[in-house]
Amino acid sequence: MTGLTIVLLLVALATAVATGARHWRLPAPSLLVVAGLVAGLAPGVPDIRISPQVISVVVLPPLLFASAEEIPWRELRAVWRPVTVLAFGLVLASAAAVGAVAAAVTPLSPAAAFVLGAVLASTDPVAVTALGRRLALPPRIQTMVQAESLFNDATSLVLFKVAVGTAVTAGAVSAPAAAGQFVLLGGGGAVVGGAVAWLVTLLRRRTEDPVLETVVALVTPYAAYVLAEDLRTSGVTAVVVAGVVLGSTGHRLGSAPVRLQVHAVYGTVVFLLESVVFAIIGLELPLLIRELARDERGWPVWVPLVAGTVVAVRLLWVFPLSALVQQRRGAARVSWRIPAVMSWAGTRGVMPLAAALSVPLTTDAGEPLPHRPLILMLTTGVVVLTLVVQGFTLAPVVRRSGIALEPEHTAREETAARAGLARAALAELEQLADLEAVPEVAVEQARRHLLARQAEAESADAAEPAGSWSDAYRDLRRTLIAAESAELQRLYEANRISGTTRRRLQRTLDLEEAGLGEDGRE
């Protein structure tokens, strides 16, 4: 069986499982890991090995970029304090605790155990975002979970480099050197990501070619990652910063048809990469177990212990922090609901796997790095265990906590926003009518359309007037859609709607504008 055949079969399997997960309303990452694990245990399945370059350079950038684009800048500014505490303190505590437990119960040396702790210290943005899409969490909680998983990379990456340097050279790294590495990795990556986002914004504002804009959108995360890595900074941080910046301005870049095309193409790429990478995680675990040495066969005990340590440290960190925040806000009683969800959402995934794969094969003396296969197996085992256990139980935890937004809440917010957009368009229409800048026939047609939308708070398609459109009416509709887009942004900036509602309604407006067509027909 050739490598190309294996890739095609893997894509087919992953796509089928991910489609089934959507149909059955199950967490796709968890189901994909289980499917990969079952396939890896089946007889006759060829061994699949994935290099760290494939994960780090090919898979991670677009997935991280897509996750970062979903974080609204407004919500991110509101949660930066707790996110900073989690991204620094919790990462350090997790690495120390995992390293101590691994050194005590496994054959790993203290230096190698610290490498494992650094690898597993941070939550995974790809897994967290993929699991969070199906949960109706409040915007602040969703942003906090996603932002923590995205911005703890610089801390965990510095820890990882310090740990690997200690294990490979058998020497110690000073605290000032580690702090300098953090500033270089995190700060340098942020500067590179901001510069790439600025350049991409300039390019996309100066072109209306759908193919060119789609290519630019697809290349953006790779450009940010590769440029940052070549400059010895954090490629992941660069991708995240570029994603957050462009996610806040993307609704103003390009025309509606171009935005729709970019969204469709990028959504397809992200779907395929997510599906394949989570299936590979499960598929590799049986192979890694078979490669363990005789003194490393205690993995059935070690994996749950390490995973339990990761979860326990997160619980012990998040609950007191949440209680302190609630007391400072003057809460009468401390609630367990938000910290419970925050704690249980801290799954591991693609990022730890990429870090473990990049652990050097040999020391500086040229000797094989002791127990490297065990580090990789324990990492993959913990990733699989957290994705399966936490992934399948996260939705029940959210439901039990009672913090999930009811569908009626989202529907009411969207209905009120749609009515507000219709009022803004009507006000713009009346101004144009007073100026007599548009034929009266087109004004009346647009007025009937908008009044119906305002009355029924339905989509534009449900109240679409019949018959062909004149050029004047089509131009008028585009002017009114621009007014609605401006009102939509005003509602968002005034905290009247969430980022999710803004994205959904902006897509509706883009579909309406694209439906006008070049010839004036749907």
Image: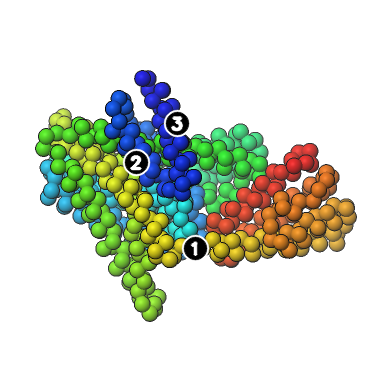
Residue located 19% across and 44% down the image: 300
- Gap between marks 3 and 1 measured at Cα: 34 Å
Residue 17: x and y in percent read 43, 38
> What residue sits right under mark 2 in the picture?
34
Q: Residue placed at 61% from the left, 43% from the top?
A: 259
On the question of residue 354 being in view, the answer is no
**Residue position for label 3:** 12
Q: Amino acid at mark 1?
A: Leu
Residue 330 versus residue 188 in the image, above or below? below
Q: Position of residue 435 (x, y in %)?
A: 85, 59
Q: CA distance from mark 2 to mark 1?
A: 29 Å
Q: Is residue 18 something one can see in this rendering?
A: yes
**Pick the front one: 357 or 221:** 357
Q: Secondary structure at mark 1?
A: loop
Disc 2 element: helix
Q: Residue 223: x, y in percent?
A: 46, 37
Looking at the picture, tell me which residue is in the foreground, 281 or 9: 9
Residue 331 in the figure: left or right of residue 108:
right
